Image: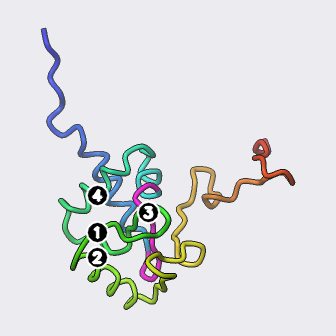
Amino acid sequence: MTTRRKANSRKPLAAAIAEAIRKVPRGRVSTYGAIAKAAGSPRCSRHVGRVLKEVGGLPWQRILGSGGRISLRGESALEQRFLLQAEGVRFKGRRVDLSEFEHRFATARGERAGTAKRSPKGKRLPPKL
């Protein structure tokens, strides 16, 4: 006997991704990987692109490739850059300065992402209990 897959097995993930994309405010950007992580599936960054393509009304221009690069090609890339500049986002060459314009999602503990303490040698310290 074979098991059947649920008809909408990707629906909850797609909804979580769309919700995370909607949280990126005007004048800020995020990456495909950060959106996937915020949606609870850090290894599904390619699925973010699929959701952007299939779901209308999302602020697609605010989602970039790793390192702040525009991953689209041709006129779509020019349109994305134009829309981001209209929102006040500045570029360094072909990339957005993520240190200034990246939207950081809050973690489950209420901390901001990327704020882990580091030792003087650069190694991560264990969290305080």
What is the C-alpha distance between the residues marked 4 and 2?
Answer: 14 Å
Mark 1 and mark 2 lie on one chain; the one further toward the N terminus is 1
Q: Give yes or no for contact between labels 3 and 1 (Cβ–Cβ under 8 Å).
A: no
Q: Residues within 10 Å of mark 3 (few under 14, many from 20)?
A: many
Q: Which residues are magenta?
A: 25-33
Q: Residue furthest right?
A: 120
Left or right, 54 with respect to 62, comes to left
Give yes or no for residue 30 being in the magenta stretch. Answer: yes
Which residue does the numbered mark 1 point to in the structure image? 72
Residue 114 screen position, x and y as percent: 64, 58
Residue 103 or residue 16, whichever sits in front: 103
Query: Label 2 sits on what residue type?
Result: Ala
Mark 1 and mark 4 lie on one chain; the one further toward the N terminus is 4
Residue 27 screen position, x and y as percent: 45, 82
Q: Nearer the viewer, mark 3 or mark 1?
A: 1
The quadrant holding residue 29 is: bottom left
Residue 28 or residue 72, whichever sits in front: 72
Mark 3 and mark 1 lie on one chain; the one further toward the N terminus is 3
Mark 4 and mark 2 lie on one chain; the one further toward the N terminus is 4
- Give the residue drawn at x 51%, y 82%: 92
SS type, badge 3:
strand
Q: Nearer the viewer, mark 1 or mark 4?
A: 1
Which residue does the numbered mark 3 point to in the structure image? 31
Which numbered marker is on residue 49?
4
The quadrant holding residue 62 is: bottom left
What is the C-alpha distance between the residues marked 3 and 1?
Answer: 13 Å
- Give the residue drawn at x 17%, y 17%: 3
Q: Give yes or no for contact between labels 1 and 2 (Cβ–Cβ under 8 Å).
A: yes
